[in-house]
C-alpha cells in the first residue's frame, strides 16, 4: 500500500492517479469502482450510487486515505484549496472533453464536500484539456476529529468514519451542456424531473412522489377539486430549493396531516415548481395561469405553510402586484407560516459561495437526513454539474435568495403587517463532528459573520426587519429553535415543537373552513 511520508513527493497510486499530501503521514490506496471491497470500504448505502446513476454520473475510483497530521507539518505549504486552506493535491486522468469530472470528498468525520478541477484558482471546464493529460483537485488537508464510538450513527450516504475518502466521479457532457447557459440546463432538468404541478396533498398521498408523468397525472389537483377549494379556506404547501412537495414535508407525521386535512375539510394542496432556473415571479405567474385555466370564475382563500425559498413564492403571491406588477387578485393569502425562509436572503447564494451552499446541503443529508433525502440529493447533483461548468451563479431561482440581489430588493419594499403570520427559525450549533468540520472553520463560518443560522438561512433573517412592512414578525408569533434543539434547515418538520406550533396555528376561524 502506498505510503505518505508527510513531504511533497508525489505518491503514485497507479493507473494515472497521483496524490501529493504534505503534512500527512500514513497510507493511501486507490480502489477502482466495481471491485468488491469498494462498498465495504465506504460503508455506503445505495442511495448515493443510485442518485449518481440516475443523473448519468459514475464513480470510477475511490482514494482511501488513513493518515495523521504531522505535529509541525511542512514549514512552507504552497498547496491551497478554494478557501485558501492547506490542501492535498489529487491528480486524476483527464477523461477528455466529452466528460466532466468532480471529486466528492468525505472527511474523517463524515462531512461531504464537492471539488472541481482547478487551474490558477479557477474551475477548469471539461472542454479544457488538463496539463499533462491530468485534472487537478485541491482538497482540504486537515484531519477532522473522529466522532466517539457512541456518537456514530447510521448515515444516509456514507457511514465511514476515521478515514478520508476521495470519490472520483465522471459524467458525459451531452448536448445539453454544450454552449448552453446555466438557466437552460437547469430548466431542462427541472422540466424533466421537477415539473410544475398543483397536486392533491392528503394524508394518504402527501409522501407520494411525482417523478413520472403518470405520477403527476394521478396526483394532480382536478378542476372539480379546485372548484371546491374556492368554497372555503384552503391550506397551501410550498416547498423550497432543490426539493419538491413530498420531499420537503414528508417529515410531518400522518396523524398531523389527518388532523389538518379534517380542519380544512379536505382543501389541502401543494405546488411543485422550479427552484433553480425560475425565480418566484415566474413560479407565481405559472400558478396563477394554471388556476385561471382550471377554475376561471373562482377565487382562492389560502393559509400557506412554506419552507425555505418557498416563502419568497408565498410573499410574491401577497405583494406581487406592488413589487412586480403581477395581478394576484385571484388568490387571497390570509396568513403564512414561514419555516426557515430566507426573507433577508442567504449569503450562501452569493456567487462566491455557491459551492459552500452545495457542500452544506450535502453534508446535512449525510448526517441529519430529512425524511426524503433522495429528492434533495437529485437536485444537488444537477447543481454540481452546472457548477462544474462555472455557471451556477447565473440561475435566477437561486439568485432570488441573494441578499444583494434585485429580487429581494424589490420584494422587501411595501408589504403590510399581518398579525396572524408565523415564523419558525433555528440557530444550529453542530455537535456532530462532520458538521463541525464543515461549519466551524474560519473560511466558511465567516460567510454568516457569526450570525446564528440553520446551516443555510440566518435565523434573524426569517423574522427580522428587512425593509418590508410585513416584517419584523412579532416575538409572540415566532418559534425560535435554540441550538440545543439540534434542528437544521432540512429537518425542521421532524421537530416536535415545530409540529405542535403548526398544529395550533393551522386552525382556520369558524365559518371559513
Image (cartoon, rainbow, N blue to C red):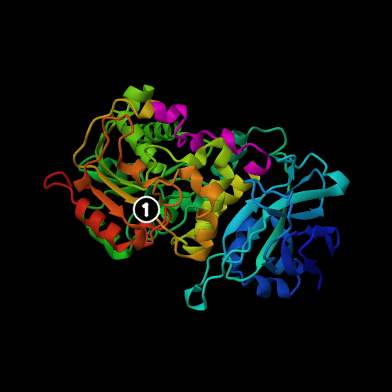
Tell me which corner region of the image, top left, top right, bottom left or bottom right, holds residue 18.
Answer: bottom right
Residue lying at the far left of the rendered structure: 510
Q: Say which residue label 1 marks.
A: 427
Outermost residue to the bottom:
150
Residue 500 vertical position relative to residue 334 in the rendered view, above or below = below
Whether 481 is among the magenta residues is no
User: Which residue is nearer to you in this view: 76 or 294?
Assistant: 76
Q: Over which residues does the magenta segment extend?
A: 387-409
Does the image show residue 366?
no
Q: Is residue 90 left or right of residue 40?
A: right
Q: Is residue 408 left or right of residue 63?
A: left
Whether residue 183 is visible to the viewer of this picture, yes or no, is yes
- Judging depth in this view, the residue of 65 and 58 nearest the camera is 65
Residue 469 versus residue 116 in the image, above or below: above
Q: Position of residue 152 (x, y in %)?
A: 51, 73
Q: Tell me the SS state at disc 1.
A: loop
Answer with left or right where residue 497 lies relative to residue 289. left
Foreground residue among 246 and 320: 320
| Left or right: 25, with 401 as reference point | right
Snapshot quadrant of residue 82: top right
Badge 1: how crowded within 10 Å, few (<14), some, or many (20+)? Answer: many
Residue 500 percent across, percent down from the top left: 24, 59
Query: Does residue 388 show up magenta in the picture?
Result: yes
Q: Residue at x 71, y 67 (%)?
A: 65
Q: Quadrant of residue 163?
A: bottom right
Q: What residue sits 75% from the left and 66% below the top?
A: 33
Instruction: For the N terminus, give its image quadrant.
Output: bottom right
Amino acid at each position: 500500500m502506498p505510503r505518505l511520508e508527510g513531504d511533497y513527493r508525489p505518491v503514485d497510486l497507479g493507473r494515472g492517479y497521483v496524490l501529493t499530501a504534505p503534512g500527512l503521514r500514513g497510507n493511501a490506496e486507490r480502489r477502482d469502482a466495481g471491485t468488491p471491497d469498494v462498498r465495504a470500504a465506504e460503508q455506503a448505502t445505495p442511495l448515493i450510487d443510485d442518485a449518481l446513476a440516475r443523473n448519468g454520473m459514475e464513480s470510477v475510483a475511490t482514494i482511501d486515505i488513513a493518515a495523521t497530521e504531522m505535529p509541525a507539518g511542512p514549514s512552507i505549504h504552497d498547496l491551497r484549496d478554494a478557501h485558501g486552506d492547506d490542501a492535498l493535491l489529487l491528480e486524476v486522468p483527464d477523461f477528455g472533453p466529452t466528460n466532466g469530472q468532480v471529486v466528492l470528498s468525505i472527511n474523517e468525520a463524515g462531512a461531504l464536500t464537492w471539488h472541481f478541477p482547478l487551474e490558477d484558482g479557477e474551475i477548469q471546464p471539461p472542454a479544457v484539456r488538463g496539463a499533462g493529460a491530468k485534472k487537478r483537485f485541491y482538497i482540504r488537508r486537515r484531519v477532522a476529529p473522529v466522532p466517539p464510538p457512541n456518537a456514530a450513527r447510521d448515515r444516509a450516504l456514507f457511514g465511514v468514519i476515521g478515514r478520508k475518502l476521495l470519490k472520483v466521479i465522471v459524467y458525459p457532457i451531452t448536448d445539453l451542456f454544450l454552449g448552453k447557459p446555466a438557466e437552460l440546463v437547469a430548466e431542462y432538468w427541472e422540466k424533466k424531473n421537477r415539473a410544475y404541478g398543483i397536486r392533491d396533498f392528503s394524508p394518504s398521498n402527501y409522501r407520494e412522489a411525482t417523478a413520472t408523468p403518470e405520477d403527476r397525472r394521478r396526483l394532480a389537483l382536478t378542476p372539480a377539486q379546485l372548484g371546491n377549494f374556492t368554497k372555503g379556506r384552503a391550506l397551501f404547501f410550498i416547498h423550497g430549493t432543490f426539493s419538491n412537495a413530498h420531499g420537503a414535508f414528508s417529515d410531518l407525521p400522518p396523524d398531523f396531516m389527518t388532523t389538518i386535512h379534517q380542519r380544512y375539510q379536505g382543501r389541502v394542496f401543494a405546488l411543485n415548481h422550479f427552484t433553480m432556473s425560475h425565480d418566484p415571479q415566474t413560479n407565481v405567474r405559472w400558478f396563477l395561469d394554471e388556476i385561471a385555466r382550471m377554475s376561471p370564475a373562482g377565487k382562492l382563500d389560502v393559509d400557506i405553510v412554506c419552507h425555505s425559498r418557498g416563502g419568497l413564492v408565498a410573499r410574491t403571491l401577497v405583494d406581487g402586484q406592488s413589487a412586480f406588477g403581477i395581478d394576484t387578485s385571484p388568490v387571497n393569502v390570509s396568513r403564512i407560516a414561514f419555516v426557515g425562509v430566507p426573507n433577508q436572503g442567504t449569503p450562501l447564494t452569493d456567487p462566491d459561495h455557491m459551492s459552500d451552499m452545495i457542500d452544506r446541503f450535502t453534508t446535512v443529508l449525510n448526517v441529519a437526513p430529512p425524511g426524503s433525502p433522495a429528492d434533495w440529493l437529485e437536485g444537488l447533483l444537477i447543481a454540481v454539474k452546472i457548477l462544474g461548468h462555472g455557471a451556477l451563479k447565473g440561475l435566477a431561482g437561486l439568485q432570488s435568495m441573494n441578499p444583494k440581489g434585485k429580487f429581494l430588493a424589490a420584494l422587501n419594499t411595501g408589504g403590510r403587517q399581518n398579525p396572524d403570520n408565523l415564523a419558525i427559525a433555528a440557530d444550529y450549533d453542530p455537535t456532530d463532528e462532520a458538521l463541525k468540520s464543515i461549519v466551524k472553520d474560519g473560511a466558511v463560518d465567516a460567510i454568516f459573520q457569526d450570525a446564528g443560522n440553520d446551516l443555510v438561512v440566518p435565523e434573524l433573517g426569517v423574522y427580522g426587519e428587512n425593509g418590508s412592512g410585513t416584517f419584523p414578525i412579532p416575538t409572540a408569533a415566532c418559534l425560535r429553535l435554540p441550538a440545543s434543539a439540534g434542528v437544521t434547515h432540512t429537518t425542521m418538520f421532524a421537530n416536535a415543537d415545530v409540529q405542535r406550533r403548526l398544529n395550533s396555528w393551522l386552525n382556520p376561524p369558524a365559518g371559513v373552513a
